Image (tube, helix red, strand yellow):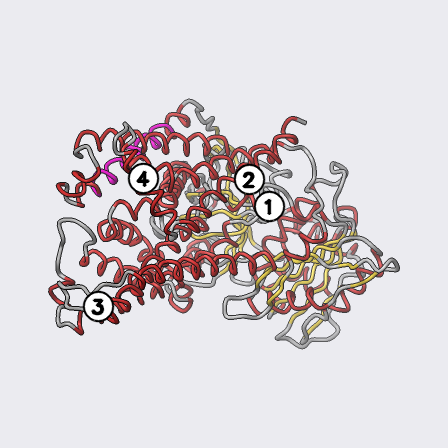
Amino acid sequence: MAASSLLPATRLLVLAAFAVWVSIWVLKPTSLWKRSWHTAEDWASRTILRDVGLNVLVFCFPVLMAAALAYVYLHLLSRERRTSRRRPIWMITMSNPVIERSPIGTLSGFELLAASLFTVLLAWTFYSSISSDFRKAIPAKFLHLNRWQIKVMSMGIRMGSLAEICLAFLLLPVLRRMAVFKILGIQFEAAVRYHVWIGNVMILLAALHGIIIMSTWTAKHRLLSEITKWQRTGRVNLAGLITLATGLVIWMTSLPPIRRKQFHLFYSVHHLYIVFILFFLLHGGDRHFYLVLSGVILLALDKVMRVVQSRPTPCLVSAKILQCRAIELTLSIKGMKYTPTSLVFINVPSISKFQWHPFSITSSSNMDNDEVSFIVKCQGQWTSALYNKIKSMQNSDVTSIKCFPIAVEGPYGPTTTPYQRYDCLLLIAGGSGITPFLSILQDISSRRGNMLKQPTIIRLVYVVKKSEDLSMLNSVSPLLLNKTKNPGQLKLKVFVTQEKRSGVSLREILQEASQVQTIFFGTKCPLASAPRPEGFLSMAAITGLFSIAFLVSLVCLSHGFLPSGKKATQGKTPSWVRDLLVLSSFVIATGCSIFATILARWRKPENVSSVTQKHVTDPDLEMQSEDTRALQEEHEIHFGRRPNLLEILEDLYDQTGESKVGVFVCGPDSMQESVASFCKKHQKFNEKRTKHTPAFHSIKFSL
């Protein structure tokens, strides 16, 4: 009860802290802010805080406070013993797609509103800054620029200011362990596309910033002298050029054709963000770096916790080789708790020590919290290498197969279970997009009779190219083939688009697809404990520790290496000294956080035991002869066509009446757009003229 009363208050504090940070960005380009800020810096320079401490408190602490409070909120939410709340109709409407087809994909009402507000922030900042610059435009004697050229130069400089705003927001969506978007119900895999949007805008603005300024220098024949100059104080132009070049390289290697076909190149080059951030500090100076520092801090903490968490390397228990060139891997990890649709990042050291790839968990922690399963389908070089490595062991002697270590990072998933909000579920999957729905079905089956609220009617629409792809359903075949294990009224509709067959039943197809071979790894395999620390309170504490350590270190170093007085500091101290103090404080705070994380982990020793694998026949194969005869007649298979969503939804409404319907989709972009367009256009009104809107949920994997 206490947690329930604290939830709204904590969430309000999170939103208030974030609103303060956004308000600072709104007020920053105004003359009122500039006058007040100069006065505040003059006052702070005469106190123990100094101007550096004031910058950290104003520009960094609101976001860090919002993040710490968000982790507390998520901790309280995870301890709340109840099903997911039903959302009001306005929230369902805003969560549903507003724009189905666009260059950036499907947009919900909330996403469109957030994008519009962000655009307004950029437009306001540019207008307010450039209008002030134009009023004060004075010909520059050292470059011999006239008033018109000064205005062009001002526009280029303000483009850089807009890129700075984008950089402040850029890193927040890609946080995994320290994900602050969870408070809004947005998971890491969905938030990645916000990072892509902001990154594209930032690179465009940064390129315009560089092109305009360098064009002005070129017009005055001073390009080479200006661009190679490393000023003692102020902005360093050469560092800015390196920053822009690094950003362009990262952007080019992250384009979809390269990211999808050369993931290792994309992943490796993306680590140049360290160079990008470092030279941005040298280019803009410490005062501009404080504006974006909060995102850098959270990313550093996220990295620390992920590295520490992924150190235990569990072993592979078994691997099932499926007919569709996919393998279902099962790992022994003691005590891992996760929610349906969660994912893990895995690394196979025998293939590559540096590549980490995300995969949806297909098992349920309610059924077995000592094992976790996921499916890997051949769709690239790394997955093909893993498949071939596992397949080469299928004819090996059981005693010769040793432990197969796989490093795991995660799980990452929703704090609550969204599917519990609805009486009826419509799950639409395409190809390997079936994997998150396997965990939902497993979870519903494991909770039968243990939940006050769960879906009573489930429709699973699975679209595949070839019938062999139905082997992906192997893990839930007992639920499909055995009526007593069927969660709710589960009905499967399969659509095989690239085959035309007749006289073949779904029972025969599933029976054929269920012929899998299971490989067991070793007779004794270490049972690794679930990675720790994993609590939200630990994240909040480490965030607070880093913030305090950074502020204290920076203030102490400034007293030791910077002269007192604002004017003296600006006139005598080179810019690189202040930059070095920021880096030193960052390293000190990071070291303190690493020590605290390892200490907390060391104080909770992991109980490592061993588990002996039983070499038994596959239970799925044992029950084929009996359970396939019990296959329910309502399961359907169609060849050579795609599903009629309107017909399926009307059938649901006929059976459920006024029940709320949740539509979950995971598949290619074309499928996402089609389902989004369908949910937007097809709404139903009951006898009381109450609008029935199917709640749209898109599960996306943008990596």
Mark carried by residue 214 = 3
Question: In the rendered structure, which disc, 1 or 2, sits on the residue that comes first in sequence?
Answer: 1
Q: Viewed as shown, does residue 18 lie left or right of 161? A: right
Please state which of residues 23 and 17 is positioned toward the viewer in this rendering. 23
Q: Tag 1, which secondary structure?
A: loop
The residues colored magenta run 579-596
Looking at the rendered structure, the kind of residue marked 2 is Glu
Mark carried by residue 371 = 2
Question: In the rendered structure, which disc, 3 or 2, sits on the residue that comes first in sequence?
Answer: 3
Mark 3 or 1, closer to the camera: 3
Looking at the rendered structure, the kind of residue marked 3 is Met
Task: Classify mark 3: residues with Cα within 10 Å, few (<14), some (14-19) or many (20+).
Answer: many
Q: Tag 2, which secondary structure?
A: strand
| Cα–Cα gap, marks 1 and 2 | 8 Å
Residue at 68% from the left image edge and 42% from the top image edge: 84
Mark carried by residue 39 = 4
Q: Viewed as shown, does residue 523 lie left or right of 641? A: left
Do the residues bearing badges 1 and 2 touch, measured as CB atoms within 8 Å? yes
